[in-house]
Image (spheres, helix red, strand yellow):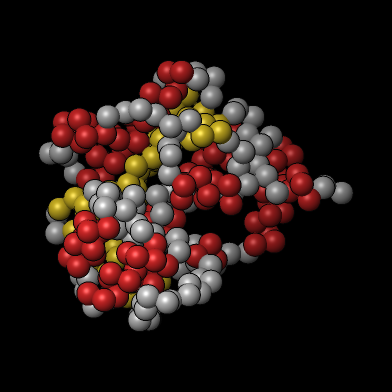
């Protein structure tokens, strides 16, 4: 009988590094049971964004993810290194992480009642060489939010370091009328990454994974529809388990 502790994790034959300081990406890999270390890169994203600004957004996220993975891979050539990046785009305009509550409120007022896109890119490097790259785009439409709801939301979650000025993995999901695509992509980690990493499993790990997947038996959804709730300053988050809503994969 396989012990529960073994079932709870995936042990790749090659050690893995996540070259990202994103808490959301870290949590998703942990939830998938994959063992890894976190070593953030020190790539100057602003300089790189300026150089690649003429490229399509799906290419830009790949370039940024690759730069982060390569920088760390040079230091740890015997590891698999994962680099990731995410871009929120509205009306062909890039919304960077707001950095302040005031900017977050301004961004959300622009997104309110409209559609925008989240582009997510992932690259895997080993020994300074690219092994795999992938990008995905999700379409989201935000509810028509009042100024009071926007201010209350920003006060509750302080999403100043989130692309788009919302945290989809928590209260931010309540801001949307619908999401067409993968909730994992909105959070910065396309689900296909997990599938690719599993190619590096041992036989025992593969058996454990199959048992886990049989146990979870998740269903696929293409579009997630949310009903609007009013966000009050005393609002208490309800437990919407986004992990039970694995959506479709639309690659670009």
Which one is nearer the viewer's eye here, 67 or 181? 67
Residue 232 visible in image = yes
Q: Is residue 201 above or below residue 221?
A: above
Which one is nearer the viewer's eye here, 220 or 189? 189
Q: Is residue 191 above or below residue 151?
A: above
Q: Residue at x 54, y 24 (%)?
A: 79
Residue 47 appears left or right of 250: left
Q: Residue at x 69, y 61 (%)?
A: 215
Residue 146, percent from left and from top: 23, 78
Numbered-mark total: 0
Q: Residue at x 71, y 37 (%)?
A: 203
Q: Residue at x 34, y 50 (%)?
A: 161
Residue 75 appears left or right of 141: right
Residue 244, percent from left and from top: 55, 66
Residue located farthest toward the right when viewing the structure as drawn: 1
Q: Quadrant of residue 232?
A: bottom left
Q: Is residue 90 above or below residue 134?
A: below
Q: Quadrant of residue 82?
A: top left
Which one is nearer the viewer's eye here, 116 or 205? 116
Residue 102 appears left or right of 155: left
Residue 249 visible in image = no
Residue 149, percent from left and from top: 29, 75
Residue 66, percent from left and from top: 35, 31
């Amino acid at each position: 009988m396989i012990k529960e502790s073994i079932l709870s994790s995936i042990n790749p034959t090659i050690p893995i590094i996540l070259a990202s300081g994103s808490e959301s990406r870290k949590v998703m890999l942990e939830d998938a049971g994959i063992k890894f270390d976190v070593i953030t890169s020190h790539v100057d994203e602003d300089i790189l964004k300026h150089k690649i600004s003429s490229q399509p957004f799906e290419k830009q996220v790949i370039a940024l993810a690759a730069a982060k993975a390569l920088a760390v891979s040079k230091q740890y050539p015997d590891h698999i290194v994962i680099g990731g990046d995410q871009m929120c785009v509205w009306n062909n305009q890039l919304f960077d992480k707001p950095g302040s509550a005031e900017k977050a409120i301004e961004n959300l007022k622009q997104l309110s009642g409209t559609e925008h896109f989240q582009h997510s890119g992932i690259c895997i490097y080993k020994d300074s060489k690219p092994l795999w790259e992938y990008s995905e785009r999700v379409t989201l439409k935000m509810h028509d939010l009042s100024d009071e709801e926007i201010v209350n939301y920003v006060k509750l979650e302080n999403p100043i370091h989130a692309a788009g000025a919302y945290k989809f993995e928590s209260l931010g999901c309540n801001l949307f009328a619908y999401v067409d695509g993968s909730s994992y992509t909105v959070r910065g980690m396309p689900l296909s990454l997990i599938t690719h990493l599993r190619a590096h499993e041992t036989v025992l790990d593969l058996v454990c994974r199959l048992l886990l997947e049989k146990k979870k038996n998740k269903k696929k959804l293409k579009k997630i529809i949310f009903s609007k709730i009013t966000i009050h300053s005393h609002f208490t988050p309800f437990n919407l388990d986004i992990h039970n809503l694995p959506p479709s994969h639309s690659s670009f």
